[in-house]
Image: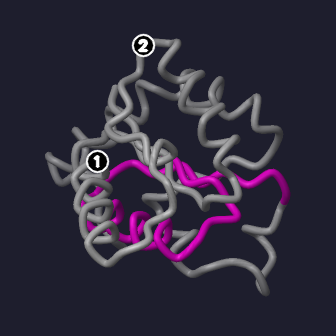
Amino acid sequence: MKFYVASSFKNIDKVRQVSNQLKSRGYIQTYDWTENEKASTFEDLKLIGRQEKIAVAEADLIVVLLPAGKGSHIEFGIALGLNKRIILYSSNDEVNKFATTSTFYHLREVETFIGPLDELVEFIITNEDRILNYRGQLLHNEISFS
């Protein structure tokens, strides 16, 4: 299964941890943005943006680690628009607090995992069949947007 992990630069170690654990289990990372240095030119931004957009499109699964920055939320939106399976991770219950949540966090296409980061990868692996079947269901119009 191909995956992409979105988050902010302040979570770079957590992104690497999740990515390395998934790769060690045979998953394929579509793009590792943690290898980039912070963009310093508009040309850098364009190049990175193209790479991240392609990576989201190629992934079967998008993992968003909160707190996430504006770029991560754009990737989240691209994933929603492409009907990708999304797992939204939070170490605490901020997703379910009205003051800190987003309307899009509560859509049917988004699955939330709240808990220790170490348990996130096990959750993904345990639910792999359901994640892969999600795309098949969308392709056969079995899931509606209501």
Horizontal side of 21 relative to 63 (left or right) equals right
Please check the rendered image and state whether residue 67 is part of the magenta-colored stretch, yes or no.
Answer: yes
Q: Quadrant of residue 66?
A: bottom right
Between 77 and 130, which is closer to the camera in this rendering? 77
Horizontal side of 121 relative to 117 (left or right) equals left
Q: Quadrant of residue 145?
A: bottom left
State whether residue 21 is above or below residue 77: above
Between 31 and 73, which is closer to the camera in this rendering? 31
Between 17 and 36, which is closer to the camera in this rendering? 36
* Circle 2 Cα neighbour tier, 10 Å, few/some/many (<14 / 14–19 / ≥20): few
| Tag 1–tag 2 contact (CB < 8 Å) | no
| Label 2 sits on residue | 26
Residue lying furthest bottom in this view? 99
- For image coordinates 69% across by 77% down, the residue present is 101
Residue 93 x/y as whole percent? 83, 62
Give the SS element for disc 2.
Answer: loop
State whether residue 53 is above or below residue 42: above
- Disc 1 marks a residue whose amino acid type is Ala
Residue 49 x/y as whole percent? 30, 65
- Disc 2 marks a residue whose amino acid type is Gly
Residue lying furthest top in this view? 25
Color scheme of the displayed model: one colour
For marks 1 and 2, the one nearer the N-term is 2
Q: Which residues are magenta?
A: 63-92
| Label 1 sits on residue | 55
Alpha carbon of mark 1 to alpha carbon of mark 2: how far?
17 Å
- For image coordinates 34% across by 26% down, the residue present is 1
Residue 38, label in figure: none
